[in-house]
């Protein structure tokens, strides 16, 4: 092939192989970062009911402030109800809605608390396709608080915009599965600051109830509450200490393992590792077995908890789990405490919150939440 033909082919986006002109593979466009948009009211405690329409169908989420009953209902063109769901004791419960040909997406949140949950419903039948907990701005301590959420469908992505007292965030979820695709905060100049996504063990945010938690005892060991304290645990030759920093939202976790000496004359060498936990909130619990160091992080004055599992000897992060706990609730003044223990190859969480207690069970190998039992007040053994 002549040089000018070669150059002409290159300009047109072709490659040449063994005398044949082959069209080059198109370059994949770099995914664009989510951009901030906001069309509604600023965060407040006086949010209106939410409505959305698609074709001849109209859906509405509302809450009766007297009975505290929240109602999600969809209607046809004539105004007849197609399907509905009601939630009792829906304190501070609000929602943002989005709809397409297949599904109604409901982002429920508390106008007086952090975070949100997203549920995808079959648009015509009202059955649940998937349910997820939003990562949002992450756990933090708060008392008086305001939140608002907006949601939009962008291509194959459900985009959640959150505006809270603590800050703003954007979170992208896959429309069909609910898997988190992106999460990040938004600064004062509306720039998106992406954060690494945790690797959840399961896509669905609601665990089996009670599942593996059936018959598992609610237990609290040692002193309670565990707020703003140095937390310690010791087992299998490993001693761990978690200390809350006096200044800054961090905590230092240090674990030291001393192998048992096989002979009285031969000294043993201890192995130690430590890490600084960012975005730490004032509350923590530890448990150790022959393979793992499991750390619970929670806020003493707001709901929820997260679990991180580290390799006992090396400190490598093996899995992360967001607990379902007692489920999403709205609150102002609140208390929260957590205890951890191992039962065989399972991690058992006992949580005591202002709105009730729960037992949650996690597979220690995979990090899958395999059971949850939430009750008004579970008596400790």
Image (cartoon, rainbow, N blue to C red):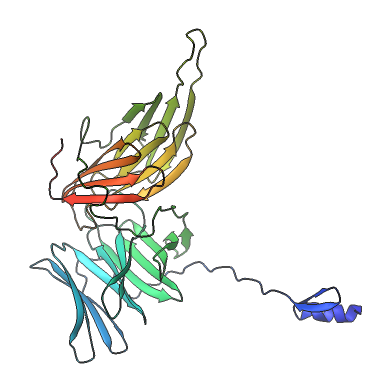
For residue 329, side relative to residue 239 (left or right)? left
Q: Vertically, is 106 above or below 250?
A: below
Instruction: Tell which residue pokes out farthest to the right in this image.
Output: 2
For residue 34, side relative to residue 298 (left or right)? right
The x and y percentages for residue 164 are 31, 60
Instruction: Tell which residue pokes out farthest to the bottom in this image.
Output: 78
Total numbered circles: 0
For residue 199, side relative to residue 330 (left or right)? right
The x and y percentages for residue 159 are 40, 69
Residue 152 visible at all: yes
Which residue is nearer to you in this view: 74 or 212?
Answer: 212
Which residue is nearer to you in this view: 373 or 116?
Answer: 373
Quarter placement of the C terminus: top left
Q: Vertically, is 55 above or below 329?
A: below
Which residue is nearer to you in this view: 60 or 267?
Answer: 267
Instruction: Tell which residue pokes out farthest to the top in this image.
Output: 265
Query: What residue is drawn where x is 28% and y is 90%?
Result: 56
Q: Quadrant of residue 218?
A: top left
The x and y percentages for residue 180 are 42, 62
Query: What residue is drawn where x is 27% and y is 86%?
Result: 57
Q: Vertically, is 95 above or below 83?
A: above
For residue 31, side relative to residue 320 (left or right)? right
Quarter placement of the N terminus: bottom right
Residue 142 visible at all: no
The x and y percentages for residue 362 are 33, 46
């Amino acid at each position: 092939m002549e040089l000018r033909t070669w150059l002409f082919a290159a300009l047109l986006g072709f490659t040449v192989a063994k005398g044949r002109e082959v069209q080059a593979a198109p370059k994949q466009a770099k995914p664009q970062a989510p951009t901030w948009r906001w069309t509604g009211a600023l965060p407040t405690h006086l949010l209106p009911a939410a409505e959305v329409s698609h074709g001849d169908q109209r859906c509405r989420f509302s809450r009766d402030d007297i009975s505290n009953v929240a109602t999600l209902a969809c209607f046809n063109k004539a105004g007849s109800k197609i399907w509905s769901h009601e939630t009792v004791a829906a304190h501070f419960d609000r929602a943002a809605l989005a709809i397409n040909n297949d599904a109604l997406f409901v982002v429920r949140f508390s106008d007086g608390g952090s975070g949100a949950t997203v549920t995808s419903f079959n648009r015509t039948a009202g059955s649940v396709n998937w349910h997820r907990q939003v990562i949002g701005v992450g756990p933090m301590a708060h008392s008086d608080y305001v939140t608002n959420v907006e949601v939009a469908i962008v291509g194959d992505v459900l985009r959640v915009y959150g505006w809270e007292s603590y800050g703003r965030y954007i979170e992208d979820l896959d429309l069909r599965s609910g898997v988190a695709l992106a999460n990040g905060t938004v600064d004062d100049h509306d720039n998106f600051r992406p954060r690494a996504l945790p690797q959840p063990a399961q896509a669905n945010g609601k665990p089996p109830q009670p599942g593996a938690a059936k018959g598992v005892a609610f237990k609290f060991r040692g002193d309670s509450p565990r707020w703003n304290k140095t937390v310690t645990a010791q087992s299998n030759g490993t001693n761990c200490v978690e200390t809350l920093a006096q200044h800054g939202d961090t905590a230092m976790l240090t674990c030291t393992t001393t192998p048992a000496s096989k002979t009285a004359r031969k000294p043993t060498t201890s192995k130690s590792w430590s890490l600084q936990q960012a975005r730490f909130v004032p509350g923590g619990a530890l448990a150790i077995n022959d393979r793992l160091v499991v750390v619970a992080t929670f806020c003493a004055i707001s709901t929820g908890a997260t679990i991180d599992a580290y390799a006992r000897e090396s400190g490598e992060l093996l899995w992360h789990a967001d607990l379902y706990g007692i489920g999403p609730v709205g609150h102002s003044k609140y208390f929260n405490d957590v205890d951890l223990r191992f039962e065989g190859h399972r991690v058992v969480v006992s949580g005591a919150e202002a709105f009730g207690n729960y037992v949650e069970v996690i597979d220690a190998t995979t990090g899958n939440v395999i059971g949850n039992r939430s009750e008004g007040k579970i008596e400790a053994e």
